Image (cartoon, rainbow, N blue to C red):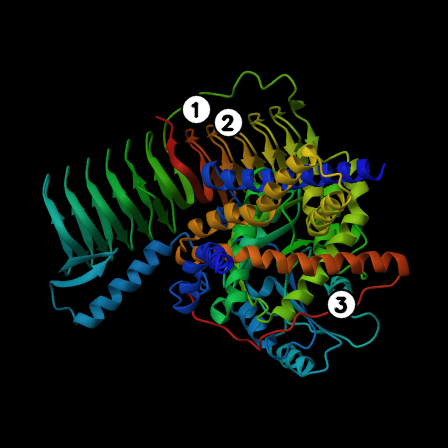
Amino acid sequence: MLLLSVVVVFAAVFALPLLPGFLEIVRPRDCKALNVDQGYVRDPHFFGESSRAKIRSYLQETHGQMPFLARFLSRRSEFAFADARIEIKDGQTARNVLLAEECIVFGDGARVLDAYSAGTMLLGNGVAARTLLCDGPMSLGEDCRIDRWIDARGDITVGHGSVLGSSATTAQRLELSAGVRFGRAFGLPVVTLSGASTGLPGQTRANAEVVADGAQVDGDLIARRDLRIGDGCRIRGSVKAHGALVIGSGSAIAGNVIARADAWVGDSVTVGGHLFCEGDLRLGDGTRIGNAVRHKSVYCGKHLELGNGVRIFGWVVTEPLGRAIA
Amino acid sequence: MVVTILHLWVLFVIVIMTLYAVRHWYFTLDRMMMRQRPYFQDLYDNDLPPVTVIVPMHDEEAVARNVLDAIVRGDYPHGLLEIIPVDDHSGDGTAAILREYGERYAFVKPLYVATGLRGKPNALNLALQEASNEIVMVFDADYTPGRGILRELAMAFVDPEVGAVMGRVVPQNTSRNLLTRLLSLERSGGYQVDQQARYNLDLFPQYGGTVGGFRRSVVLSLHGFDAQMLAEDTDLTARLFTNGWKVVYANRAECYEEVPISWEARFRQLRRWSRGHNRALYRNISNMLRAPRLSFRQRCDGILTLAVYAIPPILLSGFLANMLLFLMGALSVWSAVALGFFVVAYSAFGNFGPVYEIGAAEVLDGARQRLYLLPYLFYLFLFNSWAVTSGLLDTLGDGIKRRSPLWEKTTRSSGDRNAVA
């Protein structure tokens, strides 16, 4: 009897950790495959295009009856429509989703949730918005604040000190004034209008590999530690540094640039490929990445600073906010 | 003398098991708490490189259409795409399906192999001769690549040091039975935590050969795949690293696969992996130790990775050594303490290790209830040990008898797929 009791207790203790799993096997609550979005493709204009499609479908469903309530950006919102022009005066607040066929104008200090213009969009200084979408050009004044994203099919001009949220994308030119901060920016090109770079660091670490000023390298250049490329160098392949990277002014790199730590890119450097930096990244005045035909990207794992007159044909991505130097 | 040898062996086993336990623990901490190393998925490019996709197939009529349709549906420009499905000695309707796709799409160029060696390495070698592009992707026939995965994987090659890239494998037929659910847990731990941590720490992420790609010229310069090798992917990983190339892991490049649904099929799969892995270990270990371009950490992790299928038999031998010591009356206080450590280390490898990694992986994946199944992994570990030990014995047999292993295909569940969470 004692032996049987011991066996039963042992079996019970042994089986105890298996009990919750047994219940999960008998009545599965979490047995489906992990979700993999089979339709996912990387598209810088995803937010804009998916929102346009959603608004179009709402307009078709309601046959133009305004206002109407619908879910937009995970919130049920009221949509308000104007045939041509909507104007939100200085300091006014608009709590619905604004739709206009020709133009939306926001006065200084206006506050708005979401807005879509099939034409142009003009923002005064200090405007705050959640999302802005337009099919024509968009102009943001100084110190505007976007919580989520903006997307336009025409040029976007952004005034001094504005914050562009997680994403600012356009199929054309995106102009960033000094002090503008952003998460992701896509433009053809993304251009900085003012500011002045603080120049390159005077020295890299003592054991850095150095490429002399004016040197030409025909293949790829890979450094196991810090790498300093002198002024006016021509690299026909790609560059990779496992440490910090400094690229001297006026250098040209035909391929990609990969830096495992911080990178400083001097003035008037051209990079034909992508620029991928896992640390802080500073692009000097007049740096050019990609071109009108070959769209490339700049990725920065930490802090990104753009000097004056930087032109990036493609996507700029930073983990924290990037900044055009003030 | 015998007693001393047995004591030393037990000590050796304890050290090895503790090393693996610490490694699991460190990987989990790195994945959960440290800054994650970015992959190249955030790069956007309208100037993509042309790629060749190879899909080796042997009797795959149940799944051939699915994988080819998935690749064709992808967003990679068809003008830059070449697909080479390889019909490798199939006896079913695979060849007819490939012919149909070859006629329908100009960029699908089937390759029919009816003579000579059978097996994935040989099929890959033959396809590499036909491939016209430098970047080559490989998918197994039971995989379902998503629309954007080719682009995500191709971006890895912007890094001039990258020789190969591996994406994440996600089981699709998870809800089929207990085995598929446990395999799903294993896969999550292996990819979401183990592979990502090895990538974070610049160690030895593995090219798994099923959702990934490599540079054609590099693989050809390394004399292609060894047709006798059952783990050609692991062998390639080791050869890439020892020759100065990197393998990167793309955690967001996720692809569905079918895992075995029967214990018998899983046993055969593991046994084959073990046989191949151990052969890869034997072939590459001296190169790993001598390779000048590998850091000390990469060298250690590489050897631990290659040796992972030798561990269960080593563990078993440690138990046997302890038992012999006991029977010989030589299990002193020291040995008893050693045995205690041994049991702890055993748990760490066989039980806690997966708990660290799989638990962390499921938390990262947002799947909670399935964590209740973790204790069942102890029993899966015993099953795995048995299969892996059989594979090691096969490897030893191959070496002694100088025989060539035959490629054994994993049984498919006829395209069985389940709902997605």
Residue B196 located left or right of residue A91: right
Q: Chain of mark 1?
A: A
List the residue tagged with mark 3: B407
Q: Are marks 2 and 1 in contact (CB under 8 Å)?
A: yes
| Other-residue count near label 3 (Cα within 10 Å), few / some / many at <14 / 14–19 / ≥20 | some
Q: Chain of mark 3?
A: B
Give me the disc on residue A267. 2
Q: Are marks 3 and 2 in contact (CB under 8 Å)?
A: no
Q: Chain of mark 2?
A: A
Q: Are marks 1 and 3 in contact (CB under 8 Å)?
A: no
How far apart in space, not on screen, are marks 2 and 1 (Cα)?
8 Å
List the residue tagged with mark 1: A197
Tell me where residue B388 appears, x and y as whole percent.
Answer: 70, 57
Q: Nearer the viewer, mark 3 or mark 2?
A: 3
How far apart in space, not on screen, are marks 3 and 2 (Cα)?
58 Å
| Other-residue count near label 1 (Cα within 10 Å), few / some / many at <14 / 14–19 / ≥20 | many
Closest to the observer, B225 or B30? B30
Tell me where residue B13 appears, x and y as whole percent.
Answer: 71, 41
Q: Residue at x 43, y 43 (%)?
A: A189
**Badge count:** 3
